[in-house]
Image: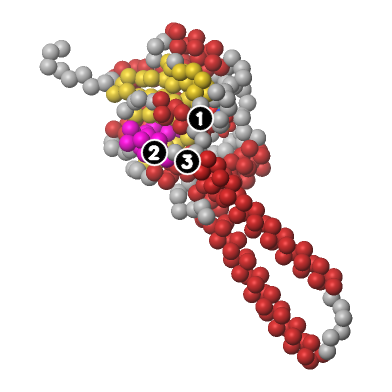
Amino acid sequence: MKGTVICMKLLSVVVPCYNEEENIRDFYDELFRNAPFFKEKEIEVELLYIDDGSKDRTVEEVKKLCREDSRVHLRSLSRNFGKEAAIYAGLQKAKGDYVVLMDVDLQDPPSLLPEMYGYIEQGYDSVATRRVTRKGEPPVRSFFARMFYRIMNKISRTEIVDGARDYRLMSRQVVDAILAMTEYNRFTKGIFGWVGYETKWMEYENIERRKGETKWSFWKLFAYSLEGITAFSTVPLTIAALIGALFCLLAFVMIIIIIVKTLIFGDPTSGWPSLVCIIMMVSGVQLFCLGIVGQYLSKTYMEVKKRPIYLVREDI
Ligand code: UDP
Ligand code: MG
């Protein structure tokens, strides 16, 4: 072997897990089904399970794998910080030349990895996936999801792709760019779009989760979408200002009408029901706009506290 340069590439697989005891081993098996491919391409793999404060036997399951295979690592967070924080924790731990993010429930099929890696070899900085169908999802959820993406892409300059998954293969450069974004309110889909770089989009049919249940309730998704809007657009603030201006204009026109009417027809006393309606409406609009400002203020408040994004309990 004298004279040959061995240049193994390290691929970090980052997998956030929250109460996923049944999926840990399945994921491991499925990932290493690509073993011949890894060997052929001289890719070394480190598999990082990020336990996001699970309350079931997730940690034990991962530890078992760690004992069996030195390629498996665990980072356990001190409590449930949310997937976004778990992803950040994983990216910080990852040492690979390339990093891939995957869900442990096998909704992001590891069998796509060879094709994704092919694109990286072609010179793309990152390879992202989007599902073209929402098969197996409640229709109401699909409807709101579509609406969200439509609105979001109108009001934000950052591109946020409908159906985009967090399943992504990235070069070290992209990972470092994401790590440099240390904001507390982490809307990952927006962050990926914001950092840019040459991205190849791969499409696939939605796959239902293998075992266990989704961690996202409708309201959790709703709150998440609001987070996305405040994190990547300030258009709602502008809208609030515009509504204010519109109402001022309306009031001005009404004052003139009333003055002219009084001068011509005198002043018959009437109209208090309409007055009540107007007061109700205007104060409603005021509270609404105040609420919008409040959203941004609360996000700013959380940012200036500079709390850590996650805390580690155990690192193996
Ligand atoms: N997840 C996490 N922390 C959470 C919620 C979810 O790390 O607070 C992980 C979860 O274990 C899974 C991935 O994020 O690996 C996606 O979660 P899920 O399948 O529930 O979301 P969905 O696929 O339904 O969008
Ligand atoms: Mg899932």
Residue type marked 1: Tyr
The residues tagged by marks 3 and 2 sit, at their Cα atoms, a distance apart of 9 Å
- Labels 1 & 2 near each other (Cβ < 8 A): no
Determine whether the beta carbon of the residue marked 3 sits less than 8 angstroms from the nearest atom of ligand 1: no
Nearer-the-camera pick, 24 or 211: 24
Residue 169 belongs to magenta span: yes
* Label disc, if present, on residue 183 of the rendered structure: 3
Which residue is labeled 1 in the image?
Answer: 310
Which badge, 1 or 2, comes first in the chain's sequence? 2
Q: Amino acid at mark 3?
A: Glu
SS category of the residue bearing label 1: loop
Q: Residue 269, located in which quarter of the rendered image?
A: bottom right
Q: Which residues are magenta?
A: 167-181
Q: What residue is at 68 percent from the left and 61 percent from the top?
A: 286
Residue 27 falls within the magenta-colored stretch: no
Task: Give the answer, above or below, for where 61 lies relative to 83.
Answer: above
| Disc 3 + disc 2, Cβ < 8 Å | no
Q: What is the distance, in whole Å, between disc 1 and disc 2 at their CAs? A: 15 Å
Looking at the rendered structure, the kind of residue marked 2 is Ala
User: Left of 159 or right of it: where is 270?
Assistant: right
Q: Is disc 3 surrounded by few (<14), some (14 to 19) or many (20+) residues within 10 Å?
A: some
Query: What secondary structure is found at the residue carrying circle 2?
Result: loop
Mark identifier at residue 180: 2
Q: Position of residue 120 (x, y in %)?
A: 32, 34
